[in-house]
Amino acid sequence: MDPRYRQTLLQMMQSQAYRELAAAQMFGFGLQYVPELRWLKFMTWHIREEMEHYEDVVKMYHEFTGESVEPVVHARLKDKPIEFAQSWYELAMAQFLYDRGGFWQLQEYEACSFEPYRKTILKIIKEEKGHQALGERIVVELTRTGAFEGEKQAVFEKWLRQGLLSFGRPDTDGARYAISVGLRRRDPGPVMQDFIDDIKPAVKACGLKMPSMESIGIVPPASGLDLSLERTDEKLAQGWVA
Ligand SMILES: [Fe+2]
Ligand SMILES: [Fe+2]
């Protein structure tokens, strides 16, 4: 195996393992804010699935390298501590944006040229499909009660940033290489745009503003991003009731 190909795969696996464990930890920390049994059931199920995704990546890494990725992941968690949600509203926002970002990120590896990675990712994507929509629904319903007007924009920006960080930096040599050898489909730039387009109806339904990428510390692609909500139909948001 070409050393650069192998090195890129190692990085992909390490990042994926980090994201899955970070998700399990963040949603686990948030359990204390869950107000009702029906959402507790959803959240504990979700945490378990994120932990199992972590396990899948740990196994794949071990088969590939003969080593454990766990020390790498723990070092990275220590080095780059994850953000935690501090309320039920924030947890719902994290469920919506952090999880949705991960979902769009994973889809770029659906046709990955390294078969074991592709297989693992396809299984994770199937399960992530089941996580979609509920976070968005809770955010839209809660926001439209009017009880979160003072905090909604800041909470949105915090988790929008976390969602966007899943994609990595646009226009890098590393991404160009990964695309050229079929490890990933596209540059992070267009993936960011897909994610943004996907969340626009809910953003508009909540009366939120799209911040500039620079203001939330995200490097946009050189070609720019379309952040406009003008032609967005808020009725398409989950949880929308006229
Ligand atoms: Fe996951
Ligand atoms: Fe998830």
Image (spheres, grey):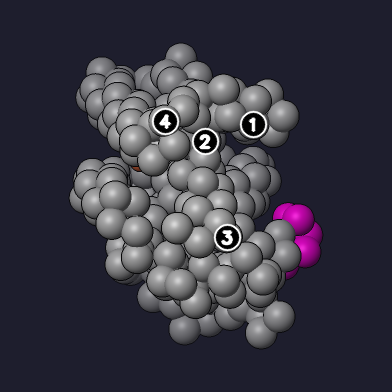
Q: Are marks 4 and 1 in contact (CB under 8 Å)?
A: no
Question: Could you tell which of marks 2 and 4 lies nearer the N-terminus?
Answer: 2
Compared across the picture, whether 134 is left or right of 26 comes to: left
Between label 3 and label 2, give the one nearer the viewer. Answer: 3
Q: Are marks 1 and 2 in contact (CB under 8 Å)?
A: yes
Callout 1 crowding tier (Cα within 10 Å): few <14, some 14–19, many ≥20: some
Mark 3 belongs to which amino acid?
A: Arg
What residue does disc 4 label? 66
Mark 1 belongs to which amino acid?
A: Arg
Q: Which mark is residue 167?
A: none
Q: Which mark is residue 76?
A: 1
* Cα distance in 3D space between marks 1 and 2: 7 Å
What residue does disc 2 label? 18
The vertical placement of 157 against 179, above or below, is: above
Secondary structure beneath label 1: helix
Residue at coordinates 76% horizontally, 56% vertically from top-left? 217
Q: In what quadrant of the picture does the N terminus appear?
A: bottom left
What residue does disc 3 label? 4
Residue at coordinates 33% horizontally, 31% vertically from top-left? 59
Mark 4 belongs to which amino acid?
A: Gly
Q: Is residue 213 rendered magenta in the image?
A: yes
* Cα distance in 3D space between marks 3 and 1: 22 Å
Question: Could you tell which of marks 3 and 1 lies nearer the N-terminus?
Answer: 3
Q: In what quadrant of the picture does the C terminus appear?
A: bottom left
